[in-house]
Image: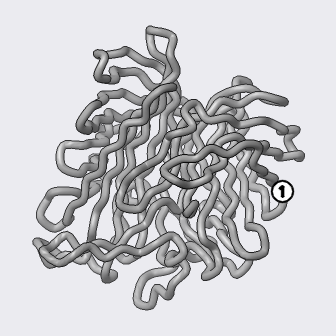
Amino acid sequence: MNAKACLIFLMSLLSAPAVAQGFADLGTDAEGFAMPERGTTFRFPDDHGAHPSYRIEWWYLTATLTGEDGVDYGVQWTLFRSALAPEDGTGWQTPQLWMGHAALTTPESHFVAERTARGGIGQAGVTAAPFVAWIDDWEMRGREGRGISELSLSARGQAFRYELDLAADGPLVFHGDRGFSVKSAADQASYYYSQPAYEVSGVLHLPEGPVRVTGQGWLDREWSSQPLAQDQTGWDWFSLSFDSGARMMGFRLRDSAGGFTSATWIAPDGTTRSLPDGALSVSPLATTEVAGREVPVDWRVRLPEFGVDVEVAALNPNSWMDTSFPYWEGPVSITGSHSGRGYLEMTGYE
């Protein structure tokens, strides 16, 4: 959810063994932490920064790219913050823990890297003005005086790296009720906004050599303290950019009753319409075995109110994030009533 409630963790980075929180545990009690409230007004640039009184937060960027070689690619850059206590702190005693994920996807390969850090020693963090999000030498940096509307982005792993520039040509999008995004029938919720309209250019460094690329990017910002209900075990999240200029975000949170859905329609001029539970329909069309799991990699996605009835297919079905908390994340193509490209994220497939 990228919504993305995405991958959340509680991890000790001291000498003790790592302690983790699975996807289902996002519905556990969050006593002492702040909770999202309907009707809250966002404040910028402050809300581009960290919210240490909330338990869970992320800065989540995906990009669908095409190289000068004519090949399609995908890039992911994510910084997760998780709090052991609702306070900031300094040095090794800070309760604020950080994890970074970076990925580069080609039709044949999926490269993944992960970083973990304590925020209080300067190894990772986010500042709102000027905007900078970093973990080690990975960085998402805003241009001076431009907030998050113009960014430079970099990350590297053992067999890849990338340097990208992003410039937004549309407004921020607030999901749900003016950014209050409900995740269950019991009203679990997060604060959730996006910048879905980046134009992207830069260089991917692959084992075969560098490739210049252009394309589109989508940044999700989300924070909460208890975003899921106790019986929700994972989600299927779609960010779709259509050739018409329209876009949509949609997700299904899986539970014992079948699932809770939400969607946002984004018109070419940036105006939005939020759709309630039941308006979006997603159903798997094909699965593939990835990392010993059967994972749906082709989907039918329908949003009847806007005439959307499309097939979403993975560029690379093996886009498995083999990280501390594994999940599937990768670029997709869109055919049917609308054409285009997007990103798919799936969690909780055991």
Question: Exactly how many numbered labels are in the figure?
Answer: 1
Residue at left offset 83%, top offset 61%: 278
Query: Residue reaching furthest bottom?
Result: 31
Taking the image as shown, residue 342 lies to the left or right of residue 302, namely: left
Q: Which residue is mark 1?
A: 279
Image coloring type: one colour
Image location (x, y in percent) of residue 166: 41, 30
Q: Position of residue 238 (x, y in %)?
A: 64, 46
Out of 255 and 63, give the one closest to the viewer: 255
The residue sitting at 78% across, 74% down in the picture is 257
Q: Secondary structure at mark 1?
A: loop
196 shown above or below 19: above
At 53% across and 62% down in the image, what residue appears? 5
Residue 147 or residue 330, whichever sits in front? 330
In the picture, the quarter occupied by the N terminus is bottom right
Q: In the image, 179: left or right of 80?
A: right
Q: Position of residue 149 (x, y in %)?
A: 43, 37
Left or right of 195: which side holds 174? right
> Looking at the rendering, which quadrant does residue 176 occupy?
bottom right
Q: Is residue 287 left or right of residue 304?
A: left
Q: Residue furthest top?
A: 69
Whether residue 3 appears in this view of the structure is no
Specify the quadrant of the image occupied by residue 326. Answer: bottom left
